[in-house]
Structures are given as C-alpha cells and as structure tokens.
Image (cartoon, grey):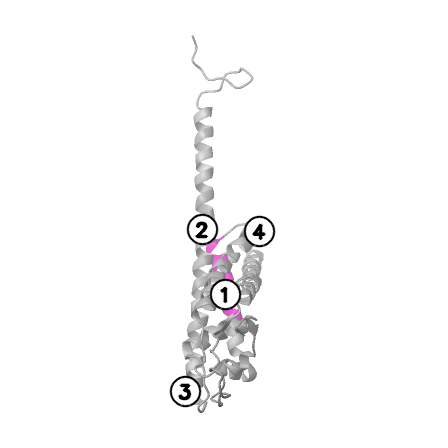
Amino acid sequence: MSKSLKYKHGGPVPEGEDAADGASDDDRGGASGVVDRELAVPGLVAGFGAFVLTYVVTLATTFSVRAGAATGDEELPHVAVEAAWSVLLSFGAALEQGGEEINALDFTYAWTINVATNPVLLLLTFGLAVLAGYAAADYAGADSVPRTIASALFVVPAYLLCAVLVSVTATWTPEDPDGGGPQPAGEAPEAAESVSVALADAALYAGLVWPAAFAVVGALLVLGRRRWLAARE
C-alpha cells in the first residue's frame, strides 16, 4: 500500500513540497520577528537617547542660568526638578498644584528666561526629536514608505515612558506655602501641596503628539534623501 501524501482533494503531493511549505512558513515567521525587532530597536534606542540628551542639555542650561542670575531669597525647586519640568513644558505640558493648573513662570526661572530671550532650547528639544526619528528610520533601512515611517514612530514609546516617569517623579513641595505671612489666630498653618507636571499633559503632548509628529518629519527627511540620491545615480 502506498504511503505517499495526498492533497485534500485526493491527489498525490509531489515529493518535497510538504517539507518545503513547512520550512517556508517557519522562515516567514522567523523573518517577521527579525524585521519587527529591526524596526523597533533603533527607534526605542534613538527615542531614549534623544530624551536623555534633551534633559542633560536642559539641566546644564538651567544650572548655568541659576548660577549667573540673582534669584534672591525666592524659593525655587531643585535645579534637577526644574530642568525636568522645562523639558515637558517645552512640549506643551502644564504645571499643576493640588490638581489645579498653575502658572509655570513662577517656578521655572531658567526656562522662562530662555524661552523669552532665546528659542535655542526649544529648537534643540524639537530638533532632537526629529533627529531621533531620522536616525531610527535610516538605521532600520526599510524599503517602503509605510515601514520607514513605522520605524521612526518607534521613538514614541520611549518618549512616552520618559515623559510619564518625569511627570510622576519630578515633584516639589514649597516649604512655605503662604510666603512667610502671619497665620490668623487659632488657625493651623496650611499644608503645602506638591507641584508637578500634569500627567495627562505629559503623556499626551510630551509622550505622544509631538514626538510622533517630529519623528514623522525625520522619516520624511530620510525618504527625501533616498529619492535625491536615487535621482543622482
């Protein structure tokens, strides 16, 4: 009795076809996993790197402005906290205290001065996000427009995670919420409420909207450069 394989309709399967089909399926599955990693890893690394570099530059700027300016006895947050706030404020987030939005200019001394007099800090923040998208798309080397843009958009999860972490951890509580004024007789001093970046704003603007927009710009620059090089050949 013949033990040869048969199609579902009863016909014989040519020798080697079954094994070839199985191998091709495995190969496609493995290749798909590799391609996904090739798209994701450059974007995540570029995103984390861009956010950290943005913070480091902002921290150095904040420190230098604080050192060279006379703030008097004004109570301000730690320079590292102010720098973290400044990064998120540059993306459009807001400060809040006790669940209510407050004026960020009262607590971000260095950021206020830089935004008012010199837009370089803002341009650096946005430019690094574009550069992250560009680097991710270029390194991934995707051969189609959707995959090139997708590779750049992998910087967004990195920005989102960093923005949420900064919003949750970079908090500051004023030591004197009443500015040192006298307390009415018989009333206990009012408890100070922490100041932080609004979590919803941080996630939406600094973690999703603007990183995605600037990453797409970087991907489009990669596509434009490739077409320009192809036209020259």
- Image marks 3 and 1: residues in contact by CB distance under 8 Å: no
* Lower position in the chain sequence, tag 3 or tag 4: 3
Residue at 42% in and 76% down? 59
Residue 58 visible within the image: no
Going by the numbered disc 1, the residue's amino acid type is: Leu
- Image marks 3 and 2: residues in contact by CB distance under 8 Å: no
Residue 136: within the magenta?
Answer: yes
Q: CA distance from mark 4 to mark 1?
A: 18 Å
* Lower position in the chain sequence, tag 4 or tag 2: 2
* Lower position in the chain sequence, tag 4 or tag 1: 1
Q: Please rate how many residues cluster around mark 2, counting C-alpha atoms within 10 Å: few if below 14, some from 14 to 19, many from 20.
A: some
Instruction: Give the foreground label among 3 and 1.
Output: 3
Q: Please rate how many residues cluster around mark 1, counting C-alpha atoms within 10 Å: few if below 14, some from 14 to 19, many from 20.
A: many
Q: Please rate how many residues cluster around mark 3, counting C-alpha atoms within 10 Å: few if below 14, some from 14 to 19, many from 20.
A: few
Q: CA distance from mark 3 to mark 2?
A: 44 Å
Going by the numbered disc 4, the residue's amino acid type is: Pro
Instruction: Give the foreground label among 3 and 2.
Output: 3
- Residue bearing the label numbered 3: 67
Residue at 53% in and 50% down? 143
Q: CA distance from mark 3 to mark 4?
A: 47 Å
